């Protein structure tokens, strides 16, 4: 595609009453992962560089930044190139496919009320020694993704007992096995109760405000034109894919009628409604390498 084509893609994503612009697509890297996960992973069909640039440009990402995101994804071993003449197609590697195989179930579970919780918590007591201080950021990010809260310093807990193996792998990877104690148990009436644990462990008030904005944006009316719907769809799915990083997916018993589950259900419904049109538009964009 030409520079003019990319400029038109950006123009088609300009502000309007139904442009879904309140849903920020995130970084170029995360937006690229959304595009790969929606259009490349399900079919295995590769994507032209120009096709990826067209959609990323429609998200407001500059061409140079988009190209850097593609190059970094390749350097990370997520995608691999195949040159055809002067153009390049990109396919997911085995490592790239694993990203979606492991992450997709977590995203799709965000609407689940988790009504089977029996009151048990998976509890970690983690001490980060000075020699491992560089692991702090990765530890916190991994525990957040696994749905852990931090109600008091050094104490992390989650109602998701099924994620024990995931957390164990994280702890071992960071070399913190000798600095971690774990156990499973229920909270008692000694000290703070389950409701207080939730209030102190997670910033749910801030998260609720964000979900209110998301639901207000998801009007159900598709933006005009194939590109308008495509770009809104990518924004919406990119937003949905970030839910697990901030939403611990707490049980219905702790958070009745949680707005996060309602937002996830709304996105699932709109995604199903628009997917035919959106995938047809992607197939059209990706049908040739462009100029």
Image: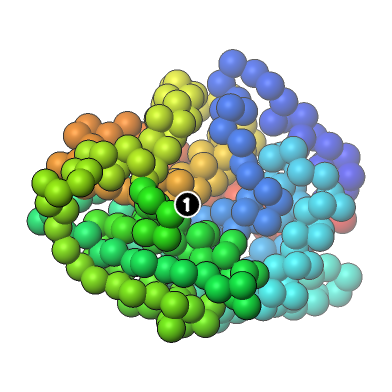
Give the SS element for disc 1: helix
Note whether 85 is above or below 240 in the view shown: below
Q: Residue furthest front?
A: 190
Q: Which residue is mark 1?
A: 245
Between 43 and 169, the residue placed more toward the observer is 169
Q: Is residue 119 visible?
A: yes
> Which image quadrant for residue 6?
top right
Camera-nearest residue between 147 and 264: 147
Say which residue appears at 65% left-offset and 70% top-offset. 134
Q: How is the image coloured?
A: rainbow
Residue 288, position as x, y percentages in the image? 73, 59
Question: Residue 138 in the image: x percent, y percent?
Answer: 57, 66
The quarter in which the C terminus is drawn is: bottom right
Which residue corresponds to the image point at 43% horizontal and 54% vertical from the top-left? 153
Note whether 289 is above or below 236 in the view shown.
below
Q: Residue at x 45, y 26 (%)?
A: 209
Which class describes the residues within 10 Å of circle 1: few (<14), some (14-19), or many (20+)? some
75 sits to left or right of 163: right
Q: From the viewer's perspective, is residue 192 above or below residue 214?
A: below
Residue ID at (20%, 46%) = 191
Q: Position of residue 289 (x, y in %)?
A: 77, 61
Locate residue 161: give its quadrant: bottom left
Front-most of residues 44 and 214? 214
Q: What is the tally of numbered marks visible in this picture? A: 1
Q: Nearer the viewer, residue 93 or 123?
A: 123
Across and down, in percent, residue 238 comes to 54, 46
Left or right position of 211 against 10: left
Asked if residue 108 shows in the view, the reply is no
């Amino acid at each position: 595609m030409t520079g003019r084509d990319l400029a038109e893609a950006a123009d088609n994503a300009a502000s309007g009453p139904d442009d879904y612009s309140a849903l920020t697509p995130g970084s170029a890297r995360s937006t690229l992962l959304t595009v790969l996960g929606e259009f490349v992973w399900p079919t295995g069909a590769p994507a032209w560089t120009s096709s990826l640039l067209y959609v990323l440009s429609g998200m407001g990402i500059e061409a140079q930044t988009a190209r850097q995101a593609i190059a970094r994804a390749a350097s990370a071993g997520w995608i691999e190139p195949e040159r055809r003449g002067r153009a390049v197609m990109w396919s997911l590697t085995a490592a790239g496919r694993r990203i979606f195989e492991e992450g997709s179930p977590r995203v799709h579970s965000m609407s689940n009320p988790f009504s089977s919780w029996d009151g048990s918590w998976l509890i970690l007591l983690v001490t980060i020694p000075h020699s491992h201080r560089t692991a702090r950021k990765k530890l916190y990010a991994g525990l957040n993704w696994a749905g852990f809260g931090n109600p008091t310093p050094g104490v992390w807990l989650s109602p998701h007992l099924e994620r024990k193996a995931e957390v164990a792998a994280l702890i071992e990877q960071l070399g913190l096995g000798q600095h971690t104690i774990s156990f499973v148990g229920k909270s008692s009436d000694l000290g703070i109760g389950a409701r207080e644990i939730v209030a102190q462990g997670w910033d749910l008030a801030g998260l609720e405000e964000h979900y209110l904005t998301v639901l207000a944006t998801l009007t159900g009316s598709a933006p005009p034109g194939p590109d308008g719907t495509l770009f809104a769809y990518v924004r919406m799915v990119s937003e949905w894919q970030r839910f697990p990083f901030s939403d611990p997916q707490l049980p219905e018993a702790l958070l009745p009628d949680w707005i996060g589950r309602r937002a996830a259900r709304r996105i699932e419904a709109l995604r199903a409604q628009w997917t035919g049109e959106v995938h047809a538009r992607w197939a059209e964009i990706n049908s040739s390498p462009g100029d």
